[in-house]
Amino acid sequence: MGTTLYRGGTVYSDADAFATAVLVSDGVIAWLGDEAGADVQSRQSDVRQVDLGGAFLAPAFVDAVGGSGAGPDALARLGVVESWDEGGRQPYARVVRTDAELRALDPGTLACLDPTELVDVDLAALAATGLPLALGFATTADGGPWRRVQHALAGGLSARAGFVAHTRGAWRASARPDGHALGRLHIGAPATFAVWDAEELVTQAADARRSSWSLDSRAGVPPLPRLAPVDDAGWEPPSCLLAVRDGVVMHRA
């Protein structure tokens, strides 16, 4: 696989709120940091450099529902690197399609759902009870994963909580024994991420009065692309420029 340095962007990582670059070596994140550190890493003789051009690099999405019928190539173009069917999910993960099914879940069950099809459900209230959530595509992948995060925001979750449910939460639903440890970018983690053309990055809560429309990382909350209200017909989700799984490029725009 070799070594590739992705630099010059904004990296979503709770391990380094100021990261702008990621070094990938043999499918694993070997380093992440700022541009000064990237200059040092670039001096290695075998490093291939990729200029992100200010793009947003974040953990790749995972489809925890698996009902869209979309193939791996189509999903990769949406920044989605895995999709779970029944055999790929943990026994404690259940696909739910209605409010009644959600409320009937046993304690400790991980709810796999598509928030675009549960538009009247208060996801924040359910999450407050301790119900873990994982997002995915029920019948179609139209609009992609950012549309699901947008609807999760409309359902009362913060943008960050919706994003985590579609990344780390979805990995936890998988039958992979290491699924609980995936969906974050840090040294030693699999190099599984997507790069987006997001124009505006913010920290955004469901309550607009608590949203911070800035890129101030001193708050310790990594920013995400701005999500418009679900009734904003003019809003378009970010486009995926690059999707990488375990260091292997699955999609390049």
Image: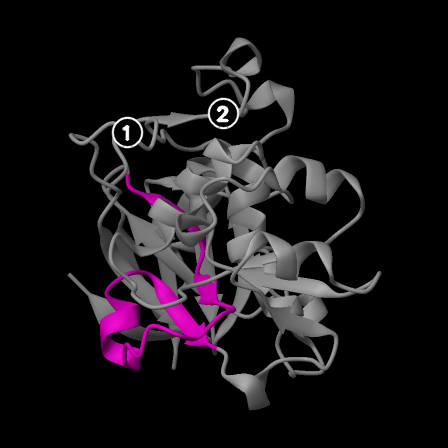
Which residue is pictured at 39% across the width and 49% down the height? 116
Residue named by callout 2: 204
* Residue 114, visible in the rendered structure: yes
Q: Is residue 222 left or right of residue 110?
A: left
Q: What separation in Å lies between label 2 and label 1 (alpha carbons)?
A: 17 Å
The total of numbered circles placed on residues is: 2
Element type where label 2 sits in the image: loop
Q: What is the quadrant of residue 60 in the picture?
A: bottom left
Asked if the stretch drawn in magenta spans residue 70, the answer is yes
Q: What is the quadrant of residue 2 in the picture?
A: bottom left
Q: Residue reaching furthest top?
A: 209
Q: Position of residue 181 (x, y in %)?
A: 69, 66
Say what amino acid the circle numbered 1 marks: Asp
Comparing 111 with 6, the one in front is: 111
Q: Is residue 12 left or right of residue 10?
A: right
* Residue 183, visible in the rendered structure: no
Asked if the stretch drawn in magenta spans residue 136, the answer is no
Say what amino acid the circle numbered 2 marks: Gln
The numbered mark, 2 or 1, whose residue comes first in the sequence reads: 2
Quadrant that contains the C terminus: bottom left
Q: Residues within 10 Å of mark 2 (few under 14, many from 20)?
A: many
Comparing 94 with 217, the one in front is: 94
Q: Which residues are magenta?
A: 55-83
Element type where label 1 sits in the image: loop
Which residue is pictured at 36% across the width and 29% down the height? 226
Q: Position of residue 172 (x, y in %)?
A: 66, 68
Q: Residue reaching furthest right?
A: 107
Residue named by callout 1: 231
Comparing 118 with 230, the one in front is: 118
